[in-house]
Amino acid sequence: MSTKKIVIDPITRIEGHLRAEVEVDEDGVVQEAYVSGQLFRGIEVILKGRDPRDAGLLAGRICGVCTNVHFRAAITSVEDAYKIEPPKNAQIIRDLITMALFIQDHVVHFYHLHSLDFVDVTSALQADPKLTSKEADKYSDHPFRNSDTHYEAVLTKLQNFVKAGKLGPFNNGYWGHKDYRLNPEQNLILISHYLEALEFQATMGKAVAIFGAKSSHPQTQVVGGVTSVADMLNPQRLNDYLFVIKEAKEFINRAYLPDMKIIASAYRDEMKAGLGRANGNFLCVGGYEFEDDQRLFCNGVIYGHDFSKIEEFDESLISEEIDRAWYSGEGRANEVCYTDLNEDGSLKTAKNDDKYSWIKAPRYDGKTMETGPLARILISYSKDNQLIKSFVDEFLNETDLELIDLSSTVGRNCARAIETNYICEYIFKLVSRLIQNIKYYDTETWTKYDFNSLEKSAKGRAFFEVPRGVLSHFVNIENEKIGNYSVIAPTTWNASPKNFDGKRGAYEEALVGIKIEDTSKPLEVLRVLHSFDPCLACAVHVIDAKGRELSSYKIKTL
């Protein structure tokens, strides 16, 4: 059977570095996939030799999107090494910052990085504003900004973009592709919310900044706690935070969730068929404490979509392989080992020991895993987590879907929206706990310690559930300096390359078996990969100590 190779590089709309090569048969069905991280990730090298108390400020620069979570994981790993326990108020404030980031990140991902895989902009130009408002009423009792005049204004704005030839993010899409299934009015609804989400993104940044001092790079977390005590004790700052979250809740309930119901309805057959489904291995480390020792997320491991048997997470079962990644060496201290591409610019994948990605290959008990909102939903729901169960049941009942249907391309998006909804609900309880502590004169935000009296050498680690999945940081402190540092990010799990064993990571596994209708417009590949919310921005952070430019590159895209 002859096959044809399709190359997409870059994958992501706003930041690149992710490449996919898929081999399709005569019918356009993907037989094999190779997903490659295309730029070197050197932040761990920068951290070596630094004061461990500065780890957060440096690690927070791993990414321009996931800044807070890397900052927090770095701080926590150092606290773990020195056995420092931050006060409860500090933990709550850290959670409030992280929860705000979850909400912001999920909404931005869907509308600005992924929605145009489902929304045909040219179709929206044919929409009737009056019919659009009626269409929105089908999916919500109180749709967001739902009026004929509003949709007329959105349509006029879109038409002006087209006339001026300044399409911006709407440029270079596969408009007219036969796999776009929304009608013109549904397309106009989602484009309206796309534009509204631009303002939503800025508003949520305020929530992060209230306790984090700034966004997108918070500054207030330190080893031992947080420094934003004045904000915590200021009723106006607390009210400002709550006001932003209330506004967010309105958008989520009246726009984001209804839009997911629209897409789930249009692509119901694909969800039922499991299109974009990986191997069914899911990993979640759990976390985020609420009252009565409940956790927002349960830890656990699922194998092969067996929801009846959830194993407890065991960090000792994690390994990280490099057989087919551009590294050499043993353990976490690997050396760069770049083997170049084929003469035609394609990845070297002919042999099972060819290296083809800067992304390493993490394994759990020797198996590839999927991590992220879908994993959290499946594991927490299957473990009967009462904090989230009703939110999942409500969505499944309203869309006439089953839990297994979420394990699909569209289902990942549904899981992300459900998660955003219940996080937005329970974030108010976190604020109430903080207020209660203050009410009873508990205002501690930092655990005092004497750095000079701490152990000179120590090891620590931190595991967190963050917007895209499981994040772990590992620090080895030697003679009061960072001797070695390692990060396994969520995308490292999901975008894992093959190893000598040939096991595909979640990205690659989800691509195999999908049918590409038009190989010149591989929308189906983009849709699958975007559903994971790829984050490759943390791939490269290499600097010269004197601030000189090392090299400059121009990437040509076809």
Image (spheres, grey):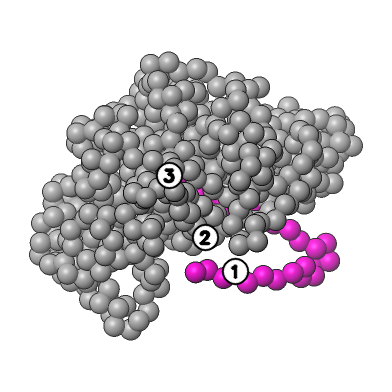
Mark 1 or mark 3, which is nearer the start of the sequence? Answer: 3
Q: Are marks 3 and 2 in contact (CB under 8 Å)?
A: no
Q: Residue at x 83, y 40 (%)?
A: 483
Kind of residue at badge 2: Pro
Q: What is the C-alpha distance between the residues marked 3 and 1?
A: 34 Å
Judging from the image, what secondary structure is the residue with disc 2 in?
loop
Q: What is the C-alpha distance between the residues marked 2 and 1?
A: 10 Å
Kind of residue at badge 1: Ile
Q: Mark 3 or 1, which is nearer the eye?
A: 3
Judging from the image, what secondary structure is the residue with disc 3 in?
loop
Q: Which residue is mark 2?
A: 10
Query: In the picture, residue 384 is in which quadrant?
Result: top left
Magenta part of the chain:
530-558
Mark 2 or mark 3, which is nearer the start of the sequence? Answer: 3
Judging from the image, what secondary structure is the residue with disc 1 in?
loop
Mark 1 or mark 2, which is nearer the start of the sequence? Answer: 2
Is 24 colored magenta in this rendering?
A: no
Q: Are marks 2 and 1 in contact (CB under 8 Å)?
A: yes
Q: Residue at x 23, y 33 (%)?
A: 401
State the residue in front, 82 or 132: 132
How far across and down, in percent of the image, does residue 414 sit?
33, 41
Q: Is residue 541 above or below residue 419?
A: below
Q: Residue at x 74, y 69 (%)?
A: 551
- In the rendered structure, find residue 1 and report the number of the disc placed on it: 3
Q: Is residue 374 above or below residue 250?
A: above
How far across and down, in percent of the image, does residue 160 sit?
28, 80
- In the rendered structure, find residue 555 and report the number of the disc placed on it: 1
Is the residue marked by circle 1 packed among few (<14), some (14-19), or many (20+) residues within 10 Å?
few
Is 531 colored magenta in this rendering?
A: yes
